[in-house]
Image (tube, rainbow, N blue to C red):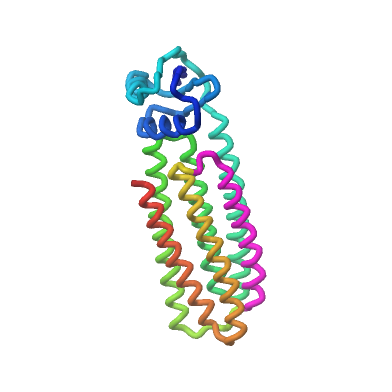
Amino acid sequence: MEKTVFQIRGMDCPSEENLIRTHLQGLESIANLDFDIPNRRLTIFHNGQIDQIERSILELKLGGEKVSTETTDQTQFEENTKQKQLLWSVLGINLAFFLVEMTTGIISKSMGLVADSLDMLADSFVYGISLLAVGRSLVRKKRIARLAGYFQIILAFIGLFEVLRRFIRTEALPDFTTMIVVSFFALIANVTCLYILQKSKSKEEAHMKASMIFTSNDVVLNLGVIVAGALVHWLNSNKPDLIIGIVVFALVVQGAVRILKLGR
C-alpha cells in the first residue's frame, strides 16, 4: 500500500472535498481518501502507481501539488471501521428480529409476519454484503449493490408464490394480537437501524444507500402488518394478512429495482 500526500491550495470547504471525491471515485487503485481541509491537504492510500491519480488531481485545477509518496502498512481506516461498526449493529438487529418474526409468524399462522421475517433475513444478507464492500473501490461497491438487488428480487418472488398458495388454500385465522405486538417492536428496531445508518458519513456510497433503502422499506412494511392485524380482527378474515404479504414482496421488488439502478 502506498500513501501519497497532496497539497491542494483551492480546497477550503466541503464543496471542494465532494468535487474531489466525485472526480476520483472511478479509480479502483484508491483504497481511502483522508481530507484535511484546514491545512488543505489530501492523503490518498492507494495500490500501484500514482501517475493516474495525480493527473486526475491536476485536471480539477484546484492548485493540487504532490508533496510526498511513501510505503505504508496501514490497511484499516477510521471511516471504514465506523462503517463496519454501524453495519454490524444493524445486521445483529435484523437477524434477531428474523428469528422472532419467523417463530411468532409460524405459531400465530400469520403470513404477514413470516413474509416480514424473510425480508429481515434478506436485509441481513444485504448488510453482510455491505460489510464486504467497506474499503473497496467504487466499482466493486456497485457490483455488491447489484448482487444485493438480484438477491432481493429472487427472495421476493419465492415469497409471493407462497402467499398466492395460501390464497388458494383454506387457512386458519392468524392471531391478530401477535401480529400487532411483534410488528410494533420490529418497527422500533427498523427505525433504530435507519437512525444508525443515517449517522454514517459514507451513506451516499452505493452499498450504504442499498442498506438504507432496505431499512426504509421495512418501516413501511411494519406499519402495514400492524394495520393488517387490526383488519384481521375487525373483518374476521385472513385476507388482510395475505394481502399485506403481497404488498410486502411487491415493495421488496421495488426496492431491489432501485438498488440495481444504484449499481449501474
Task: Give the residue drawn at x 45%, y 12%.
Answer: 67
Residue 220 drawn above or below residue 128: below
The boundaries of the magenta stretch are: 175-203
Task: Give the residue drawn at x 60%, y 50%.
Answer: 195
- Near-viewer residue (22 or 145): 22
The tally of labels here is 0
Q: Quadrant of the N terminus?
A: top left
The answer to whether residue 191 shows anywhere in this view is yes
Measuring from the top left, give residue 24's x and y in whole percent. Answer: 38, 30
Task: Give the residue drawn at x 52%, y 25%.
Answer: 37
Residue 9's quadrant in the figure?
Answer: top left
Residue 166 drawn above or below residue 62: below
Measuring from the top left, give residue 129's x and y in whole percent. Answer: 47, 46
Left/right placement of residue 199 relative to residue 248 reads: right
Residue 44's quadrant in the figure?
Answer: top left
Q: Is residue 182 magenta?
A: yes
Q: Magenta region, mostly helix, strand or loop?
A: helix
Residue 33 drawn above or below residue 142: above
Measuring from the top left, give residue 85's x and y in whole percent. Answer: 60, 40
- Near-viewer residue (102 or 37): 37
Left/right placement of residue 178 relative to residue 49 reads: right
Measuring from the top left, give residue 10's x and y in whole percent. Answer: 44, 22
Task: Give the residue drawn at x 52%, y 79%.
Answer: 240
Residue 182 drawn above or below residue 78: below
The answer to whether residue 49 shows anywhere in this view is no
Q: Is residue 190 magenta?
A: yes
